[in-house]
Amino acid sequence: MKKKTLLKLIFCLFAISMTFATETNQYTIDTILKGISKVEKPYISNGYIVFTAEDSARHIGIAFDFDNYKTIHSFQKLVSYSYDNEETSSIMFYLLKLPENSSKISYRMIIDGLWTTDPNNPTKEYSKEARTWLSTVTYPDTTIEQTLSKPNYVKFVYEGKAGEKIRLSGSFTNWDSFIYYLVETKAGHYELELPLPSGTHYYTFYKGLDVILDEKNPNKVYTPEGRVACVINVQ
């Protein structure tokens, strides 16, 4: 019985990973799934909006305004197990990457074939065009700042305690963390503007021997070397 349960767990995690592998990376999947513990209103995690629902319907779908509600995206099941590999609870969820050039989305849910607003989201508005109520989510712009006055310059920012020595390491330094130091422009606020060529770059901060990920950047990956790093794309 335990063997069958363990196989079901492995299949469940494999299915979830395969479902979102084309949309994100494995580190982001791991981080987001670890953070889902209960059914609640939509929230932002690692550059994604996380939608959750009770596992009590045969099928739960979601459709968004940016594709005119033409595509119904299915929720997936996240199962929790005890140390004895017994199923303890399950939650339905869907991950949506934050749409670019926008700070708000509208959506509707489809529960067992019935269109409805999100029962776990108290924020909704009436659409005169659609003649129905829509659930909404607003979110801030978390894009890494690329200095417009200096093409290909990127500003790295770290918030911490005053008097620290914060270093920058990345694919553009061959992961040498002793080339660039952030400057403390005010107590606990560190900055560094750096010219980078167009393309994709990976980086982390260092404090002593400790690697620190940029909390302001939701885009994180496992690099080919096995590091966990943040990602930026320079235009």
Image: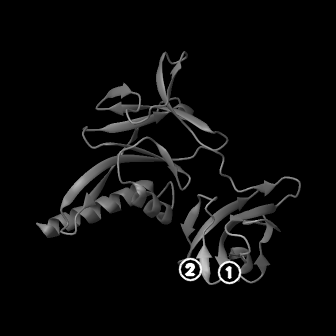
**Is 75 rendered above or below residue 146?**
above
Q: Secondary structure at mark 1?
A: loop
For the residue carrying disc 1, how many other residues have a C-alpha within 10 Å: few (<14), some (14-19), or many (20+)?
A: some
At x 67%, y 41%, the residue is 101
Q: Name the residue that disc number 2 marks.
A: 225
Q: Quadrant of the C terminus?
A: bottom right
| Cβ–Cβ under 8 Å for marks 2 and 1 | yes
Q: Name the residue that disc number 1 marks.
A: 175
Q: Is residue 60 left or right of residue 148?
A: left
Q: Is residue 132 left or right of residue 61?
A: right
* CA distance for labels 2 and 1: 11 Å
Viewer can see residue 218? yes
Q: How many marks?
A: 2
163 or 190, which is in the foreground?
A: 163
Q: Secondary structure at mark 2?
A: loop
Q: Which marked residue is nearer to the observer: mark 2 or mark 1?
A: 1
Give percent across and percent down for residue 55.
27, 43
Give percent across and percent down for residue 71.
45, 35
77 or 167, which is in the foreground?
A: 167
Amino acid type, residue under disc 2 in the picture: Glu
Q: Quadrant of the N terminus?
A: bottom left
- Residue at the left extreme, as displayed: 1
At x 36%, y 54%, the residue is 37
